[in-house]
Image (cartoon, rainbow, N blue to C red):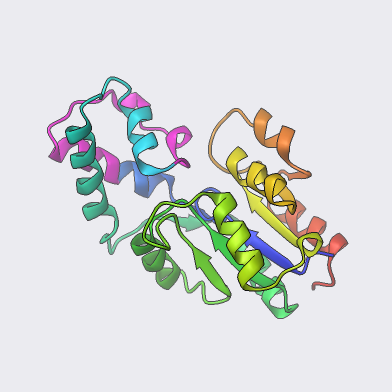
């Protein structure tokens, strides 16, 4: 039975691609660094911030310029009061269902703490027991670190715990920590081969996910 569910955030719960790409375009412009705008696609979203910047600007090798773009982006994105991100269809209903069924809910995201807190507040995501960000402990941590800390802190049984995400790192972390990994095929990136390879289950949409969770849990 799945009694504990750990969700990735971007590409799994919310579609923030339009918001993130707009902020990246503004950041590169403010840094006076020209880019090929055709590279500003949802496919680059998911990895940590510096890796995304390198995907958008593969010729960028100057660490000082890279760090400047990181800081500019964070200044824009972290404080954006007009975030146009949106839930994937059926997500809020699923979260409410899981909460009503006393399933323990967690978030594990590579997004930093400040914008995560802003998004959680904006979207009223108050059903989560805890939220793990990449900088939760002051230094960057991996999804493996996040899952292991959640398991230990909340004394969760591995065979009752599942990680749900749209990136290979999500399900690979699940496999490494000994919990179930569910690959969400609606998230970012066109090549889902690795996600499928390392997932215990894959689901095409939120409604398939709900059916899967119902079959393994006593939820509504």
| Residue 42 rendering spot, x and y as whole percentages | 45, 37
The vertical placement of 172 against 209, above or below, is above
| Residue 22 rendering spot, x and y as whole percentages | 30, 44
- Residue found farthest to the top: 59
**Could you tell me which residue is drawn at 73 percent across and 41 percent down?**
199
Left-right relation of 124 to 8? left
The vertical placement of 39 against 220, above or below, is above
The quarter in which the C terminus is drawn is: bottom right
Report if residue 24 lies within the magenta region.
yes
Left-right relation of 192 to 146? right
Asked if residue 92 shows in the view, the reply is no
Which quarter of the figure has residue 82?
bottom left
| Residue 94 rendering spot, x and y as whole percentages | 67, 66
Left-right relation of 217 to 62? right
Asked if residue 194 shows in the view, the reply is yes
The quarter in which the N terminus is drawn is: bottom right
**Could you tell me which residue is drawn at 81 percent across and 56 percent down?**
212
**Could you tell me which residue is drawn at 72 percent across and 73 percent down?**
103
| Residue 43 rendering spot, x and y as whole percentages | 48, 33
The number of callouts visible is 0
Please state the extent of the stretch shown in magenta in the rendering.
Answer: 23-47
The vertical placement of 36 against 90, above or below, is above
């Amino acid at each position: 039975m799945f009694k504990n569910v750990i969700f990735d955030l971007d590409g799994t719960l919310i579609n923030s691609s339009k918001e993130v790409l707009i902020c990246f375009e503004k950041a590169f412009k403010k840094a006076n660094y020209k880019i090929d705008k055709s590279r500003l696609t949802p496919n680059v979203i998911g990895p940590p911030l510096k890796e995304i910047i390198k995907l958008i600007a593969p010729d960028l090798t100057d660490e000082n310029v890279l760090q400047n773009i990181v800081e500019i982006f964070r200044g824009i994105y972290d404080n954006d009061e007009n975030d146009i991100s949106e839930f994937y269809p059926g997500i809020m209903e699923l979260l409410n269902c899981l909460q009503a069924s006393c399933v323990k809910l967690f978030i594990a995201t590579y997004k930093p703490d400040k914008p995560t807190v802003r998004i959680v507040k904006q979207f009223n995501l108050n059903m989560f027991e805890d939220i793990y960000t990449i900088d939760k402990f002051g230094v960057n941590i991996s999804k493996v670190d996040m899952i292991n800390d959640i398991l230990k802190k909340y004394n969760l049984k591995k065979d009752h715990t599942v990680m749900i995400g749209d990136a290979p790192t999500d399900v690979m972390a699940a496999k490494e920590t000994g919990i179930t990994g569910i690959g969400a095929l609606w998230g970012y990136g066109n090549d889902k081969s690795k996600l499928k390879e390392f997932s215990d289950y894959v689901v095409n949409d939120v409604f398939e996910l709900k059916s899967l969770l119902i079959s393994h849990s006593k939820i509504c």
